[in-house]
Image (cartoon, coloured by chain):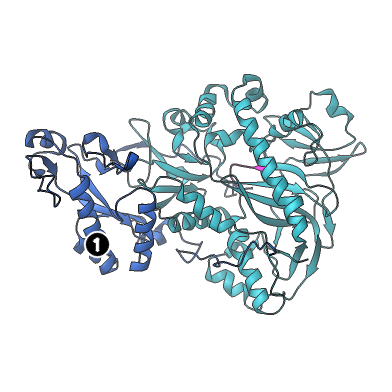
Amino acid sequence: MKRITVPARPDWQAKARAVGFGFHEMYGEPYWLDDAAYVFSLQEIEKQIEAPSSELHEMCMDLVGDIVGSEEQLDRLAIPEQLRDIVQRSWQRGDRHLYGRFDLAYDGKGPAKLLEYNADTPTSVFETGYFQYNWLTDQIDLGVLPNDADQFNSLQENLIEAFGEFPKSSIFHFAGMLDNEEDRGTIVYLMDCAVQAGHRVDLLDMADIGIDAQGRFTDLQNRVIDRCFKLYPWEFMLREPFARQLIPSGDAFVEPAWKAVLSNKGLLPLLWKRHEGHPNLLAAYFPDDAKAGELTNFVRKPLLSREGENVTITRNGEVTASMPGIYGEEGFVIQAYAPLFESEGGYAVLGSWIVGDRACGLAVREDRSPITANLSRFIPHFIQD
Amino acid sequence: MRRRFIGGRSPLLALGTIAASSLALAGCAGEAPAEVMFTTAEQCIQAGMDQQVCQTGYQDAVQAHLTNAPRFDGLAACEAEYGEGQCTAAPAQADGGGGTGFFMPFLAGYMMSSALNNMGAYNNYRRDRELNGYANGASPIYRNRSGQTLTPTVGRPNGTAIVPNRATMQPVNVNTQTVARQGFGGRSTGMGFGG
């Protein structure tokens, strides 16, 4: 693994504009970098990223049944008591899931370490599956990269295949916070994949979802929503005014409700307890566990948090980095500190995609801070031996 | 041979852009979204769809209608479900299986994706649906007494066709009345919630 600089494609901004990728700049900062790249060997991709991601996903899936069957563990994950049924039944019914992204710490030396599983609302899917792919083929055509340069990326074809597994009798609705350009772009890209899989689709804002007298969810045309992808966290849905309606009608949503136990940082101590010493896991504990106090270099993360908010890093008893935020009231976990790949570009986190149950792509983001947050940048990667 | 991850078809965007809003998808403000039901091929063409796609979709739906429309053994039974004047005698099947005094509802329309803007796209859509156990491309749509829109399910367990009846009909995003909205998304801050 290394980071290199390359000439940017001369027309990349026009290409971004042409496909509506307006958020290649966010908060006045560049988000997409066209003139830098991470390079991996095929062996690193296969042995250190792809295979461990498949294994971690299996370990997670294996744990879901135990968690949803244990009141104590659901307490630990702060799943609201009166709504546990929604989560449990979605698992028992086998509600189909679509995708997720592991965040891994990997510096090219030891095994990759699991930082967290974004199993409910992962973004950067368009950047990975579409824009990064075209970056590679363009750079090969331009002669910047050799013909045999490859990329760990079959994300889009896997998404189309996974959407194809959902029944097509009803409209596939897509919902989220549409006033956010990044979220909307992510949703429309996934909707595009669904169209390519043969679905009829419709897009609406999360707040525009309605209910009818029978407690079914409805769209703006007053049609019952039979199936709906939502880029909106389950932990919010379970605490909002329509939460009760999820009891009869929650099975409409993708990701399904059982993903709430995987996208929760409480998963990390539960995984560690089950697989203590696993090479791809970091020691992780709930704060009341005596072993949490034995860690000298550790990261404290809220159970429920997005974009690095309310995360603090402590090294040798001193807080070396922390992020403000709105999260933390549900509790925290303590995870052993793992160094990230560090270069002149900052700190890199590897996002390893799971679609259906298959590891099928890589997204590298880097940040000036060791806590990857909303000002992180997306850097394309390629494989070359 | 050395394994390669990419090298097949480069990813494409069917909608062409990820900046589409629901309004842009609908084609014009406040109109129906990417999923559409047409009552006739003419209405489909007037809506700006490709003429050949509209006609083929209609023919496919009529085919599915003849094979899969729910059958009733009397006019009254059919009308009880679908409304007075909304049923007709089922025609004799080409294979000699019909013309037996069964009744079925009129086709209210057909439904398909408005993203299908040429025959190539339609053929892919049809092939895809066939792979998923549907007989046809566009779906036949019926409207029952209470205004619900319905379509036949077309399962063929063990290779034998199911005899169409009321139980094989399923609601398709049935029309209803919304009594409340704004029950989700309350934590909106303009910030995204992906991660």
Q: Is residue A121 magenta?
A: yes
Which residue occupies 49% across, 56% down? A193
Q: Residue at x 68, y 66 (%)?
A: A150
Indicate the position of residue B76 as horizontal and vertical percent values: 7, 34
Q: Which residue is under mark 1? A: B44
Indicate the position of residue A10 as horizontal and vertical percent values: 66, 79
User: Which chain is blue in the rendering?
Assistant: B
Residue A236's quadrant in the figure? top right
Using the image as rendered, state which of residue A244 and residue A202 is in the foreground: A202
Residue B132 in view here: yes
Q: Is residue A277 above or below residue A383?
A: above
Q: Is A219 on the left-hand or right-hand side of B13?
A: left
**Label 1 amino acid?**
Cys
> Badge 1 local density, few (<14 within 10 Å), some, or many (20+)?
many
The tint of chain A in the picture is cyan
Q: Is residue B157 left or right of residue B8?
A: left
Task: Give the dominant element type of the magenta stretch: helix, strand or loop.
Answer: loop
Q: Which x, y percent locates residue B27?
A: 36, 63
Locate residue A64: give its quadrant.
top right
What residue is at 80 percent from the left and 68 percent from the top? A4
Q: Residue at x 70, y 71 (%)?
A: A148
**As drawn, A310 above or below A135:** above
- Read off the chain for label 1: B
Q: Which residues are magenta?
A: A117-122
State whether residue B118 appears in this view.
Answer: no
Q: In the image, A375: left or right of A184?
A: right
Question: In the rendering, at what x and y percent does residue B45 appear?
Answer: 24, 66
